[in-house]
Image: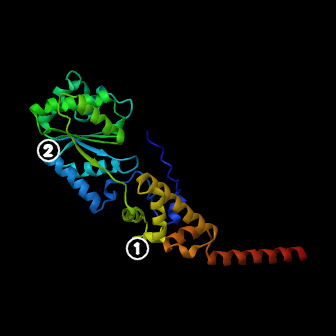
């Protein structure tokens, strides 16, 4: 069961005061801004190469918050030119019929939904293959799928592979229970259930530090501003110790540190610790020196005028 995201909420005022245009630790970022490094790229390359060389199902296994969904988004970005993709997030109520409906809706044969209603999913996909030779089904949170749904999905692929061996591909992403379901399926199924399993690890210390700095840099208002002006290396190390490289926990801890940075800077008047764009935002609510002088002069003039009127 997925845990609720406890990422601290950063207001627009806080973000602007810190010199940020958006929350760097939001779970929702553009695909172009997704973090990657040589280790993650290596895993992505293995997946993409496997898709081009074999139609063997791919299973991504990781604990909650370790980046499975991020991996799927990167794969979707990398495979977009070659595959017609259908992405599904599984819930514990998803059955095979509902999964088929999602595939039929995504890979529609006609502008009218009724055109597909009389075809079985197998015949529907055969018709799809005539137009799109490579179709990729990506199921996130696949550990939530009913066992019968998983079984029928592999059975469907087995039948289609006999006629179109390199047409239907799929990637299942999930937590440990998915592995147990696949073991059970392999022990009892009469059809091929072989798959490529890839374990996604949490980030190490160096990756966590790079990830935090990268996400902050992507959201900065000033291009010459350093991410370390907001979170230094010691704070990044503290984030790693508390998160152990888990993406969800990195986001939670990172946002909390930014909130602390904002609170400390405003409560102590520590404007020298902020960059120029940050100072401008914090000071924007105060009148300028010129305005204060003019207002003071007007106030003194008014007092003098009132005194003269009283004396007369």
Residue bearing the label numbered 1:
224
Above or below, 114 relative to 108: above
State the count of labels. Answer: 2
Q: Quadrant of the N terminus?
A: top left
Residue 286 sits in quarter? bottom right
In the rendered structure, find residue 269 and report the number of the disc placed on it.
Answer: none
Task: Give the answer, above or below, for where 60 lies relative to 125.
Answer: below
Q: CA distance from mark 1 to mark 2?
A: 45 Å
Is any part of residue 89 visible from this angle? no
Kindly give the residue lying farthest to the front in the view shown: 187
| Mark 2 closeness class: few <14, some 14–19, many ≥20 residues within 10 Å | few
Image coords of residue 178 (percent x, y): 32, 38
Residue 41 seen in this snapshot: yes
Q: Is residue 155 left or right of residue 264?
A: left
Way the structure is coloured: rainbow
In the image, taking residue 26 as reference, residue 182 lies left or right, namely left
**Mark 1 surroundings: few (<14), some (14-19) or many (≥20) residues within 10 A:** few
- In the image, residue 79 sits, relative to residue 213, either above or below, namely above
Mark positioned earlier in the residue sequence (1 or 2): 2
**What residue is shown at x 90% (from left), y 77% (from top)?**
311
Residue 121 on image: x %, y %: 21, 27
**Residue at 32% over, 51% down:** 200
Residue 63 at x, y percent in the picture: 38, 47
Q: In the figure, 83 relative to 247: above or below?
A: above
Classify residue 148 by image quadrant.
top left
Q: Position of residue 171 (x, y in %)?
A: 25, 42
Q: Which residue is mark 2?
A: 54
Single out the mark in the foreground, 1 or 2: 2
**Local SS, label 1:** loop
Residue closer to the observer: 257 or 14: 257
């Amino acid at each position: 069961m997925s845990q609720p995201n406890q990422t601290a909420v950063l207001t627009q005022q806080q973000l602007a005061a810190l010199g940020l245009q958006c929350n760097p630790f939001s779970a929702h970022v553009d695909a172009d801004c997704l973090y990657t490094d040589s280790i993650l790229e290596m895993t992505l390359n293995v997946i993409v190469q496997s898709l081009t060389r074999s139609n063997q199902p791919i299973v991504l296994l990781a604990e909650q918050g370790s980046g499975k969904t991020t991996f799927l988004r990167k794969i979707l970005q990398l495979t977009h030119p070659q595959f017609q993709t259908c992405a599904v997030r599984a819930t514990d109520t998803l059955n095979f019929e509902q999964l088929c409906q999602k595939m039929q809706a995504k890979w529609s044969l006609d502008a009218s939904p009724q055109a597909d209603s009389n075809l079985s999913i197998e015949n529907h996909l055969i018709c799809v293959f005539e137009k799109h030779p490579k179709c990729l089904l990506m199921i996130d949170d696949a550990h939530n799928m009913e066992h019968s749904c998983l079984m029928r999905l592999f059975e469907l692929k087995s039948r289609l592979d006999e006629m179109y061996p390199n047409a239907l591909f799929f990637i299942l992403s999930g937590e440990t229970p998915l592995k147990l379901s696949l073991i059970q399926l392999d022990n009892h199924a009469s059809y091929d259930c072989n798959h490529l399993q890839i374990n996604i690890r949490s980030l190490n210390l160096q990756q966590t530090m790079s990830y935090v700095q990268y996400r902050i840099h992507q959201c900065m208002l000033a291009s010459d501003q350093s991410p370390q002006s907001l979170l230094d290396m010691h704070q990044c190390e503290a984030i790693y110790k508390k998160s152990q490289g888990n993406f969800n926990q990195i986001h939670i801890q990172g946002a909390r540190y930014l909130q602390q940075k904002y609170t400390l800077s405003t409560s102590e008047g520590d404007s020298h610790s902020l960059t120029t764009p940050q100072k401008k935002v914090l000071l924007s609510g105060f009148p300028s020196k010129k305005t204060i002088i003019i207002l003071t002069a007007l106030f003194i003039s008014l007092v003098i005028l009132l005194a003269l009127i009283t004396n007369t």
